[in-house]
Amino acid sequence: MASTRPLAAWTNWAGNQRSTATEVLRPRSVADVADAVHAAASAGERIRPVGSGHSFSPVARSQGRRMELAGLDVGVRVDRERRLVTVPAGMPLHRLNDLLAANGLAMPNLGDIDAQTVAGAISTGTHGTGATLGCLSTFVAALTLVTGTGEVLRCSADEHPDVFAAARVSLGALGVLTDVTLQCVDAFGLRAHERPALLDAVLADLPDLVAAHEHFEFFWFPYTPRVQVKTNDRAPVDERPLPRWRGWLDDEFLANTFFGGVCRVGRAVPALVPTISGVASRVLTERSYTARSDRVFCTPRRVRFVEMEYALPREALPEALDALRRIVDGLPVKVGFPVEVRFTAPDDIWLSHGYGRESAYVALHQYAGMPYEPYFRAFERVAAGLGGRPHWGKVHWRDAESLASAYPRFADFQAIRDRLDPNRIFATDHLNKILGP
């Protein structure tokens, strides 16, 4: 197993989390992972597996040895008939999507970024939007886990079902995921429709809008009454492809180059942010196009930001957004990024944000380098009061005591953690804060 010494610095994509490892481990096999766990235990060290650094919370920060899984070679297995695909846990989602497409398959749903690894995405509860679909972890049919004792467990609904219920969203607290089997679907195309609208009108029609589309979301532009509505529904890929020039204009120039420029202006002159938000809300016009599903779900994100996201009981969304509008208007800092709202179905995964209820996700963003704590903390107080659950990969300040009441199976997860990692090989200060020591 390759490793590097001495101290090795790490930073996440947003630049708001940093850590230094005593050693970087790059296992090539499952046996290498198990050996690394035994070696860390003998040395009194800890291990933190990390992915691509797309979490904004400290969940990937290491305090000991850092394990990178990009070189883990466990092979790829495709069962086309049953639509099951087993891949290395360190595979990035964009490579997974290309692999699936080459085999006539696709993920049933995706988030809007494809840079995360499979393990990182499922371990933090990464999700897309769709009232009948859960987070990406709900598509996991089986997984292999190397525990804190070095044991290798193959888990599914039939094999170690209690570990399976915990490990599909585990924050890396139970062990190292080495491979994941995903329940996929036949490849499909999507018709994307994006249009400007008024926030109050969208909220008035919300139940119908959520029910009428396979995937529905909207972005609210702070300091304005306007939103951008996005719907995705199945359609032939070649029905209405987006002209190349329009894709470049919308997704490269406007969403990245232009938006990045106005964010820099807003950071330099905060008083201009409300005006900039108003202009931005008018620049995005209506468009409709069809493409391969993952190319509709996922878009390039080159403007750096910091994010908080809360999953709320769906019926609490109007109250939360009403409070959010008041918060934004009264903040001592300006908010330069739109607020994203998405929807998911209930699931049965113990630490999933969607456990046992229909959810509405509210995602707050702030441009990198702009103050975000007053904004995020103010909304967190509102969200927590409404029964909200923080996204594990996004900024939040909750602790184990406050989270225990938000997750009905929280104590069951703690018991599994005690069993699989009794010596806390995978512990960090952040995990001890949110899960208990």
Image (cartoon, rainbow, N blue to C red):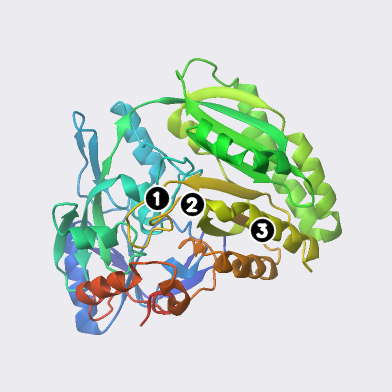
Question: Would you place residue 141 above or below residue 106 in this image?
Answer: below
The residue type indicated by label 2 comes to: Ser
Q: Are marks 2 and 1 in contact (CB under 8 Å)?
A: yes
**Disc 3: which residue:** 366
Tell which of 313 and 172 is nearer to you: 313
Q: Earlier in the sequence, mark 2 or mark 3?
A: 2
Q: Quadrant of residue 374?
A: bottom right
The residue type indicated by label 3 comes to: Gln
The residue type indicated by label 1 comes to: Pro
Tell which of 366 and 248 is nearer to you: 366
Q: In percent of the image, x 67 and y 66: which residue is there?
A: 372
**Disc 2: which residue:** 359
Report how far apart the C-alphas of labels 3 and 1 lie in the structure. 29 Å
Q: Earlier in the sequence, mark 3 or mark 1?
A: 1
Left or right side of 108 for 82 = left
Report how far apart the C-alphas of labels 2 and 3 lie in the structure. 23 Å
* Mark 2: secondary structure: strand
